[in-house]
Amino acid sequence: MKKNYFRFLKMLPLLCAFTILEAKADESSQTQIVKELVYKEFHDPGYVYFLTEKGKELEAAFYYRFITYEQIEKWSVGEKFELVIDANKGVGVRHKSEAEFFKVVFARPDNPIGLLEKTCLETAVTTLDIAGCFHQSAERWRRESDYLFRELSTSASKTVFGQLSDARTKWLAYEASLMDSFYTYGQEQGGSIMKIHSASLKSELAQSFYYQTVRFFE
């Protein structure tokens, strides 16, 4: 029974189709376009601001690491960008005129991973669909953490990166142990709602670790 339950959970991300209304796929570059943006301004110590088509301001951090001062000082107010999720680089913005990708870290309320999850949940109908939305988010948060780790491997000292890598190993072990106990608990409790809770917890854990890693850039 438990083996079948695990198999079911592993299949969720594959079975759930993308039902995101606002986003669209750029097949040539495997980049998902979430929305159109207009550049507004940037401020120290490395924050950039955009406006959506509806006039909402979005804040993103680049820490003068993902975007250099020499690059961003050339941007002009009103230039058009796209908020995207790249298959390899993750969340970022893409300059429409030059098609160049820039990695940024959006503030929590406006992070596109959370926005896409919300949209996905609004269109989900079945338990499988709802759980799939959370599993998609968990995978996206994990890819974001992987990107930051690759960046830290080239910029942090060997001592710091070694300690961080050890912490990451322990975190993943904790996460696996917690999820295993939650799966067992779900079997004992029964009901399809536990499948949704399990997927939601997995997404929350992945998001938490991502923002913990972001602290090393602030």
Image (tube, grey):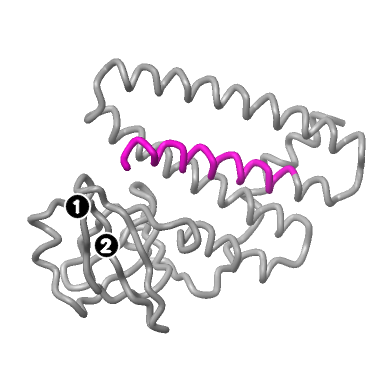
Q: Up-down: is 150 above or below 56?
A: above
Q: Is residue 217 magenta?
A: yes
Reading the image, the residue beneath label 2 is: 48
Q: Residues within 10 Å of mark 2 (few under 14, many from 20)?
A: many
Q: Is residue 68 left or right of residue 108?
A: left
Q: Residue 179 sits in which quadrant?
A: top right
Q: Up-down: is 172 above or below 8?
A: above
> Relative to the observer, which residue lies in front, 61 or 80?
61
Residue 212 percent across, percent down from the top left: 46, 37
Amino acid beneath label 2: Val
Q: Residue 218 sits in which quadrant?
A: top left
Residue displayed at 80% across by 36% down: 5
Residue displayed at 58% across by 60% down: 117
Q: Is residue 32 left or right of residue 155?
A: right
Q: Secondary structure at mark 1?
A: loop
Q: Say which label, 1 or 2, has the lower sequence index.
A: 2
Q: Over which residues does the magenta segment extend?
A: 198-218
Amino acid beneath label 1: Ile
Q: Are marks 1 and 2 in contact (CB under 8 Å)?
A: yes
Q: Secondary structure at mark 2?
A: strand
Residue displayed at 42% across by 57% down: 107
Q: Is residue 25 left or right of residue 185?
A: left
For the image shown, how many numbered marks are present on the structure? Answer: 2
Residue displayed at 37% across by 60% down: 31
Residue 205 percent across, percent down from the top left: 60, 39
Residue 104 percent across, percent down from the top left: 31, 54
Q: Up-down: is 89 above or below 163?
A: below
Position of the N terminus by quadrant? top right
| C-alpha gap between disc 1 and disc 2 | 10 Å
Q: Residue 217 sits in which quadrant?
A: top left
Reading the image, the residue beneath label 1 is: 67
